Image (cartoon, rainbow, N blue to C red):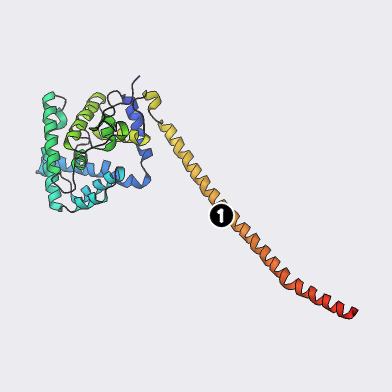
Amino acid sequence: MPTLKYTTVTKQSFETILLRYPLLVPEKLHDLDQLRYQSIPATAAKRKAAQHEDAEEAYLNKDEVEKLVEWKLSHGTFRPKLLQLVLSNESTAIETVTRDGFRAIFPHSQQNAKQDREKRDASLASAIKYLTSLRGIGPATASLLLSVYAPDTIPFFSDELFRWVMWNEADSGGQGSKWKRRIKYNGKEYAELAKRVGDVISRLKVSAVDCERVAWVLGKEGADVDVDADFGGGESVDQANANKAEEQSRSETRKEGNRGDVAAVKEMRAIETKENVKRKVVNDDSQPVEGLRRSARRKRVT
């Protein structure tokens, strides 16, 4: 039976896993996701299309790069100084360098031929070199910018995607395979990732950006990709929706329980307060009166 390894995952399993992506992304990250996967790529595509009409070339501006870096930090390891470094670049420098990087990309429409693939790989390395000349932009972030420009064919160097395609291979120290594999984030690792993702794209006829999202789901679920896909593929979409609804129900129940506990405590405190007041009244009024009466009786008897 097929497993969930990048070399054996079926198109059906791939698409089922992909459908779980929006269910796992926290609501607070939806706006950044919309920018990363829809708005900014659409803008880049318009600029790319316009270059055939009025010589305008595709590029990214500083605000767009900032949002992409924010998205990257929110989905992976948070590095607070990285965004500061990126923002230290001049706006004109970012536009010029991204324009040069995008221009270096070899047309991907002919990538099935071996010669064209070799040219593509060389052009990808050249584009990465251009983009990493900016402060705060390493190979991983550079690949993210290129993925926005060509989401169908250029993969983002994400932790989960790299670990998925390098699943059974230990790192240089001989340790850390699977989801704990250490990553150096260098050009050599990215070249290998791009090659293997290219194999998935060719075999399943899927996009690079969807490979990225499938790997993210597998990583977040901690899936064992060595296991038969029918048993180790994680939840179905219906199961995921049901589990999400159940969790929301439990959350509401906990809230109601907390409110009930607070109300009960307030009621107990109110009862205690009334009892204290009652005891105080009894102690203050009855005892002195009783003492005076006993004293009066004694005097009369004597």
Q: Is residue 57 visible?
A: no
Query: Which residue corresponds to the image point at 41% horizontal and 30% vertical from the top-left?
Result: 236
- The percent position of residue 177, horizontal first and vertical second, equals 29, 31
Query: Which residue corresponds to the image point at 13% horizontal and 36% vertical from the top-left?
Result: 125
As drawn, which residue projects farthest toward the right?
Answer: 301
- The percent position of residue 68, horizontal first and vertical second, equals 24, 46
Q: Is residue 255 visible?
A: yes
Q: Specify the quadrant that holds the C terminus.
A: bottom right
Q: Residues within 10 Å of mark 1 (few under 14, many from 20)?
A: few
As drawn, which residue projects farthest toward the left?
Answer: 55
Query: Which residue corresponds to the image point at 27% horizontal and 41% vertical from the top-left?
Result: 37
Q: Specify the quadrant that holds the N terminus.
A: top left
Q: Secondary structure at mark 1?
A: helix
- The percent position of residue 201, horizontal first and vertical second, equals 23, 28
Res. 262 image quadrant:
bottom right
Res. 269 image quadrant:
bottom right
Q: Is residue 278 left or right of residue 80?
A: right
Instruction: List the residue tagged with mark 1.
Output: 262
The one of 75 and 105 positioned closer to us in this rendering: 75
Mark 1: which amino acid? Val
Query: Which residue corresponds to the image point at 44% horizontal and 32% vertical from the top-left?
Result: 239
Q: Is residue 289 left or right of residue 37?
A: right
- The percent position of residue 196, horizontal first and vertical second, equals 22, 28
As drawn, which residue projects farthest toward the front?
Answer: 302
- Number of callouts in the render? 1
Q: Is residue 7 left or right of residue 114?
A: right
